[in-house]
Amino acid sequence: MVTSTTEKIPNKEVIQILGIARGSTVRARNIGRDVFAGLKNIVGGEIEEYTKLQAQSREQALRRMNQDAQRLGADAVINVRLTTSMVMQGASEILAYGTAVKLK
């Protein structure tokens, strides 16, 4: 599955738009990570536990978007975007979405 943040894929022609492909995940912090994050907050620097959590969440949302595009019969997803929103305190959603297309 070709995935791109651009409108076009070099040397390929979009012949059909199949719709919006999307994938999301909602993740919550956990007490173990919060303890380490609190300590890091005191001394400063990157909170690696949260960085890893966000990276895993992004990858899962992108995988789910690609699965949705495959279900639609797509060859590619163009104009891919990622967004996040807080669902409740301590939990956020990451949404990946784009346009599922057929290529020539």
Image (cartoon, grey):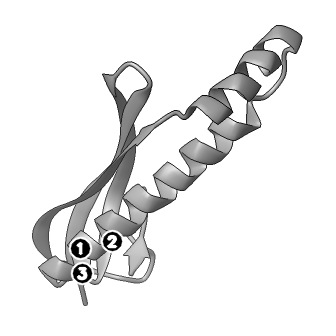
Q: In the figure, residue 63 lies in which quadrant?
A: bottom left
Q: Residue 10 versus residue 69: which sits nearer the camera?
A: 69
**Kind of residue at badge 3:** Gln
Marks 2 and 3 close (CB-CB < 8 Å): yes
- Pointer 1: residues within 10 angstroms few (<14), some, or many (20+)? many
Q: Are marks 2 and 1 in contact (CB under 8 Å)?
A: yes
Residue drawn 33% across the image and 71% down it:
66
Secondary structure at badge 1 equals helix
- In this picture, is 74 found above or below 35? below
- Give left or right: position of 57 versus 23: right
Residue closer to the observer: 86 or 6? 86
Instruction: Please state, as top left, top right, bottom left or bottom right, where the N terminus lies in the image.
Output: bottom left
Residue 26 lies, with reference to residue 89, above or below; the image says below
Q: How many marks?
A: 3
Identify the mark at residue 70; answer none if there is no mark.
Answer: 3
Residue denoted by label 2 = 66
The location of residue 82, given as percent across then percent down, is 39, 45
Q: CA distance from mark 2 to mark 1?
A: 5 Å
Query: Which residue reaches farthest front?
Result: 31
User: Badge 2: few (under 14), some or many (20 or more) residues near its Cα, within 10 Å?
Assistant: many
Please give the name of the residue rendered at 41% of the width and 77% of the height, measured from the top-left corner. Answer: 2
